[in-house]
Amino acid sequence: MSVLNLILVNLGRNKRRTILTMLSVTVALFLYCTLGGVLDTLQEAIKVGSETRLISRNAISLIFPLPISYGSRIAAVPGVKRVAIQNWFGAQDPKDPHNFFAQFAVDDENFFPIYANDIEIVEASPPQATMTLPEGMPSRLASYMTEQTACVIGQKLMTKMGWKLGQTITLAGTIYPGEWPFTIRAVYHAKKRSIGEETMFFHWKYLDQKGMGGRALVGVYILDLSNPGRAADIAKQVDEMFENSGAATRTESEQAFQAGFVSMYGNIPFVLRVIGLAVVFAILLVAANTMVMAIRERTGEIGVLKTLGFTEGIIFGIVLAEAAVITMGGGILGSLLAKWAIEGTGFNFGGFLPPMSVHWATVITGIAIATLVGAVSGLIPAWQASQLRIVQALRRVD
Amino acid sequence: MGAVQVRNVRKTYVRDRQQIPVLDGLSLEIADGEFVALMGPSGSGKTTLLNLIGGIDQPTSGELIVGGTNIATLKGSKLAKWRSRNIGFIFQLYNLIPVLTALQNVELPLLLVKMSGAERKKRAKTALELVGLDDRLKHFPRQLSGGQEQRVAIARAVVSDPSVLLADEPTGDLDRKSGEEILELLGRLNREFKKTIVMVTHDPHAAERATRVLHLDKGVLSN
């Protein structure tokens, strides 16, 4: 037998209480890490953006469009290699309106070459006729390019919705009312986890003709730069160019744009942190209560140990270790469970954010917090046990 | 020099701001290898004296020299370490740890000594053989009779080879036959292993086993 055996035996004397306390710590740490995972995912969402790309949007708000005429003027700015356009579509699947996913109308000849390093076309319908694709376009998009209602879907969205390549799906427009039929002509795989695979892309011209009546309004311009080092100058130049026009622009790096998008979640990160701390505090009280009860029941035994020569330090250490084992065990279990379960679901907030992830740093922080909770919750009972007067403790036995 | 020297020891408890004297200037000497029985009515201070000799309580004043050390001057971990090396305790209600087996209970005092796990186990087995319980190593206290429990407690008390054994009513909770066996065992430890034993008892029959009987009354020795 060793002191470690003694600690484990003590934990096993009231198995139900030990397991229930450990489970409560597990649940608390699962919740803490899940909330941490939301924060991690929001951070991840910011990383979606590249610093080599700029986004130009309406200076008033993202919901106001920009004229199509800006495109050629922006493309003429020195240092801008290519300009793509992207519009938020926001339609719903009429069969399941709550099963939301993101859809964007894009100008294919510029959008796909710009994002060639981020997404890869892994499946596509064979082309009906031979055609020359614009420079930088993935060759597998040939069939997509020849059909006005064609769309490109992310791999995960395909699996989630049970769609097949070549299938025609119909969405119900919200911003652009009416029924919108689309034919799935290609499937993409995200090369970066942060990009996400639950988005649909389709021809901007289709949206312009059917949804905007040819008014050619643009949601945002995506600027691919030949010299990212000049990004700040270029952004300033673009914004100055449209400063006195009817639709002034706000140009920023894609990363900053994404951060601004995430900031629309308002104080959610703060609220999540507060909830996380409240959970930790509640569990601290539960663990402390358990340890106080456990030690109170063993007052006589602690008296015996002290009589045998166990010093105050050893008694203090044993009680503290018992608390740490309970909370650390629960902490490790809860934190790892959160990482495994949350990442396993691949939940992505309807495509608004990358698939939810719990970073290892969050898991380790969770375990560290659990250990700290163990130490703090065990401090008072450990101190009380170590300071117990032997004569008083033995009297409890008699 | 005796194994235990008690010099003008006073012990006063304070309860509800009232001072209650328990031992009143008590002096006593117990020689090495002596078997002393402490008798007296309830509240006479027998257990208090035993606790003071064992270093689990502190005198209000006076000197307590046990094994050549004035333990009245020792505090905290020093006193605990001294206790683990010099004193073996035997309680009326055995005070075994219920979730540990007989062998593990006897191993407990050896956790405080630097030795290998195998050596610890070997010594604990030897102690249990000494008390005739080598066939009950893996039994838990609830699986043992009162007499057997007390024998495990005696094995625990002697496993670290202390020079002084302190027994507080060791037969007080046992039937006559088991009590006899325990007294026989204590006598053997005294005779064969030269252990100095101080035993508190109410039982005159048990006291007959001792080489000397002391009577305490109202905190003073009456003979």
Image (cartoon, helix red, strand yellow):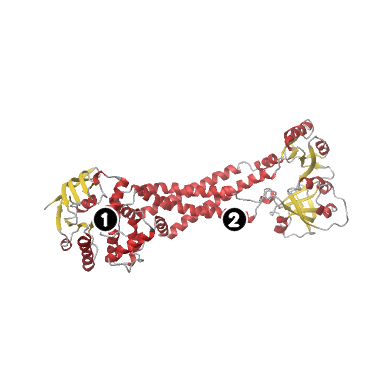
Which chain does the residue under circle 2 lie in?
A
Tag 2: residue type? Trp
Q: Is residue A316 left or right of residue B216?
A: right
Q: CA distance from mark 1 to mark 2?
A: 55 Å
Name the residue nearer the viewer: A337 or B157. B157
Of discs 1 and 2, which sits in the foreground? 1
Q: Residue furthest left?
A: B223
Where residue B85 is drawn, which disc sits there?
A: none
Q: Quadrant of the N terminus of chain A?
A: bottom left
Q: Measuring 14% from the left and 54% from the top, which residue is drawn there?
A: B215
Q: Which residue is mark 2?
A: A340
Q: Quadrant of the C terminus of chain A?
A: bottom left
Residue B146, above or below A110: below
Where residue B162 is drawn, which disc sits there?
A: 1
Query: Residues at marks 1 and 2, common chain?
Result: no
Classify mark 2: residues with Cα within 10 Å, few (<14), some (14-19) or many (20+). Answer: few
Residue A168 drawn at (x, y percent): 79, 58
**Secondary structure of the residue carrying numbered label 1:** loop
Residue A354 drawn at (x, y percent): 67, 49
Which chain does the residue under circle 1 lie in?
B
Residue A14 drawn at (x, y percent): 41, 59
Name the residue nearer the viewer: A158 or B143. B143
Q: How many marks?
A: 2
Asked if one can make out residue A149 in the rendered structure from this viewpoint, the answer is no
**Secondary structure of the residue carrying numbered label 2:** helix
